Amino acid sequence: MCSVLGYFNAQIITITKGITVHASQHWRWVYDPEADQLLVELDHGLVHKCPYKSSRLIPLNPMHAAFSMEDAACFQEFYDILSTYELWDPMLLTQAALNRTILAHFGRPQMPQSWYFQSCSETPNYPLDVGALVELNSGIETGVFVIMAIDDEFAECMLISSSMTLSDVKVMQQFDSVKVLINRLQASHYLQLHLDDDHLRHA
């Protein structure tokens, strides 16, 4: 096995479209402070680069550590829920689930940023659990998000859309996360359409 530094000097291989990835005990966290880049070393020579700045993560030390059972469960829960929607290919599902695991393990607590988003008078008429799709509206643009964590007051959501404009100077990129009040969560058009179809079939 190559050293951490040698690993970062090697060519980075991204996740290839069409491959379905399942959590494995062989996955490893890799971090070199000189490169300031957190990676997840997967099976078959695949590597996932953490997309978040170091300011979004807790301080990290040099690391080449195995995924824990909790890490694997965190990944698999998110991946399996997203795959049921049949909206995205395995590459995006894997990236989203790995990024959720990164934030769960290494992410700094987020302060709410509800002011960027319009409030909604009606909450979605489906369970707002981890993995549920919702939409947030900045008044400029609407983005599709997936819930990563939720309590009675706030939800932490990951952007699944390619990007979303919040203001003249702030744009969220795919897989960025934001913490908002529950009253900012709008129903996903996709889930609402399926609920309406189910209602008509059983009417």
Image (cartoon, grey):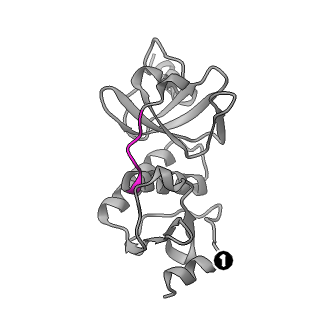
Residue type highlighted by circle 1 = Gln
- The picture places residue 39, in percent across and down from the top left corner, at 51, 67
Magenta span contains residue 93: no
Residue nearest the observer in this picture, 78 or 117: 117
Left or right of 138: which side holds 105?
A: left
Question: Residue 42 versus residue 172: which sits nearer the camera?
Answer: 172
Residue at the location (48% across, 15% down)?
A: 120
Q: Is residue 128 left or right of residue 192?
A: left
Q: Quadrant of residue 62?
A: bottom left
Residue 59 percent across, percent down from the top left: 41, 60
| Residue closest to the eye, 49 or 92 | 49
The residue segment tinted magenta is: 106-111
> Label 1: how many residues lie within 10 Å, few (<14), some (14-19) or many (20+)?
few
Compared to residue 117, the image places residue 149 above or below, namely below
Occupied quadrant, residue 128: top left
Q: Residue 43: horizontal and vertical position, in percent?
A: 50, 74
Identify the residue under disc 1.
11
